[in-house]
Amino acid sequence: MQLIDLFFCFLQIGALSFGGGYAALPLIQEQVVNLNHWMTLTQFTDLISIAEMTPGPIAVNSATFVGIHLHGLLGALVATLGVLIPSVIFVGILGYLYKKYKTMYLLQGVLTGLRPAVVAMIGSAGVTIFLLAIFGTTTFHFNPLAAIIFALAFIVLRWKNLNPIMILLLSGVLGGGIYMALGIL
Amino acid sequence: MEEKKISGKEYWTLFRTMFTLSAFTFGGGYVIVSLMKQAFVDRLGWLDDDEMLNLVAIAQSSPGAVAVNGAMLVGDKVGGIRGAALSIIATVLPPFIILSIISMFYAQFRSNRYVNAFLTGMQPAIAAVIASVVVDLGSKIFKAKKLTFILVMFLAFFANYWMKMNIIIILALCAIVGGTYAVIEKKKGGARNAIN
C-alpha cells in the first residue's frame, strides 16, 4: 500500500513541478513532510543539502532518497518512475506538436519569442551561481580566488575547445586544494 | 515521435555523453542544459543553436526536471524513440546510483571536508560554463537585429531574476509576443503582396 502511495505522491510532484530545480522543493516538502509524514523537517533539510552536493535533478534525487528511506531500493525505483512518467507524457505531446507544426509561421513566431526567454532564464541561473561563487551566500565578501578561477575557466572555454566537464573537475581539485591549503575550508 | 536510423556506435555516444553530463552536473537544470549545448551543438554538431533553444523551451514548458525533459528531446531528435529512452535512462541512472549509495552514508559524506572543498572549488567554473553559453546564445539574439526580441530577452531576465516571476507566466507572455509578432509580420507581408 505504501508503495502505491509513494508512486502517486511522486507522480504528483513530477506533474506539478514547473520550472525545474528548486521550484520542486516546496511541492516535495508538502507531500513528503506535511501530508504523508514520511520524513521530519530535519530529514528533509538533509535531503536538500544532499541534493545540492550531488549531481542530478532535485526531483530524481528526492525520489531516490525518500524511496530508499521508506522501502529500500524498490521504493526508490517506484518513486523515481512516478516522478518521470509526467515528464515523458508532457514532453512527448509537446515534442510531437513541435515536430508536426514546426514549419507553421505562428509556431515559428512563438518559438522566436521563447528563445530569448530561455537565454534570459539560463542567464538568470548563471548570475545566481556567479554571485554565490564569487561572493558567497551569507557574509557577502569578495573571494579573489573564485574570481580568478571564473576568469580562467571562461577564457579557456572561449578559446580552447576543452570538454567543460574537465574544466569543472580541474577547478574543483585546484580551487578545493587551495582552499584547504590556506585553511579556509 | 519518429524512428531514426543512427548507428549503434552513435547510440553508444549518445548514452555515454548523457550519462557523463548527468554524473558531473551539479546544480540546477540550466547547468546541464548548458553542458548539453556544449556537447551536442559545439562538439558533436548533431543540432544547431536554434534547435537546441527550441528544445530547451519545450523542456521548460513541460512539468518535471528540465534535465530529464531536455535529455528526452535531444535523444529523440538524434535517435528517435530509442534515442529518447536511452537518454532518459542515461540521465536518471547517475543520480539514482549516487543517491542510493549516499543515503546509506549521509552523515559521513556531509562532514567530509575534501568533498566540501571540491564542491566549493567547482562553483566559479560552473558559473563560467553558463556565462560562456549565455554569450553564445545571447549574441545570436543580438545578431538577428530584431529589437522586439532583444527587449524580450532583457525583460524576461528582469522578470525572472529581480521580480522572481513564475517561469510559466514569463514563457507564456513571451510566446504571446512572438506569436503576435509573427501574425503582424504576415499581415504586413500580405498587404505588401496585395499592393504589388
Image (spheres, rainbow, N blue to C red):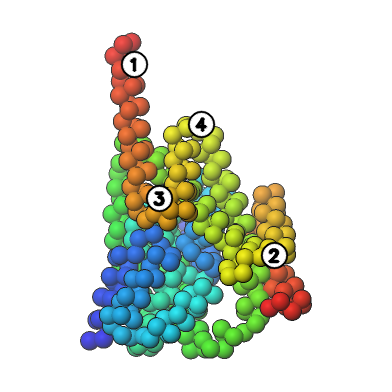
3D distance between C-alphas at marks 3 and 2: 34 Å
Of callouts 4 and 1, the N-terminal one: 4
Residue B145 numbered tag? 4
Q: Chain of mark 4?
A: B
Instruction: Kindly identify the amino acid type of the residue bearing the numbered disc 2.
Output: Asn
User: Label 3 neighbourhood size at 10 Å, few (<14), some (14-19), many (20+)?
Assistant: many
Residue B192 numbered tag? 1
3D distance between C-alphas at marks 2 and 1: 58 Å
Of callouts 3 and 4, the N-terminal one: 3
Co-location on one chain, circles 3 and 4: yes
Instruction: Kindly identify the amino acid type of the residue bearing the numbered disc 3.
Output: Ala
Q: Secondary structure at mark 1?
A: helix
Co-location on one chain, circles 2 and 1: no
Image quarter of residue A180: bottom right
3D distance between C-alphas at marks 3 and 4: 21 Å
Residue B51 % position (x, y): 45, 45
Is residue B37 depicted above or below A4 in this figure? above
Residue at the image position 70 percent from the left and 69 percent from the top: A175
- 3 vs 4, front mark: 4
Residue at the image position 33 percent from the left and 22 percent from the top: B188
Instruction: Kindly identify the amino acid type of the residue bearing the numbered disc 4.
Output: Lys
Q: Chain of mark 1?
A: B
Residue at the image position 64 percent from the left and 62 percent from the top: A134
Q: Are marks 3 and 2 in contact (CB under 8 Å)?
A: no
- 2 vs 4, front mark: 2
Q: Nearer the viewer, residue B10 or B149?
A: B149
3D distance between C-alphas at marks 2 and 4: 37 Å
Residue B14 % position (x, y): 49, 60
Q: Quadrant of the C terminus of chain B?
A: top left
Q: Secondary structure at mark 3?
A: helix
Residue B80 % position (x, y): 38, 55
Residue B79 visible in the shown view: no
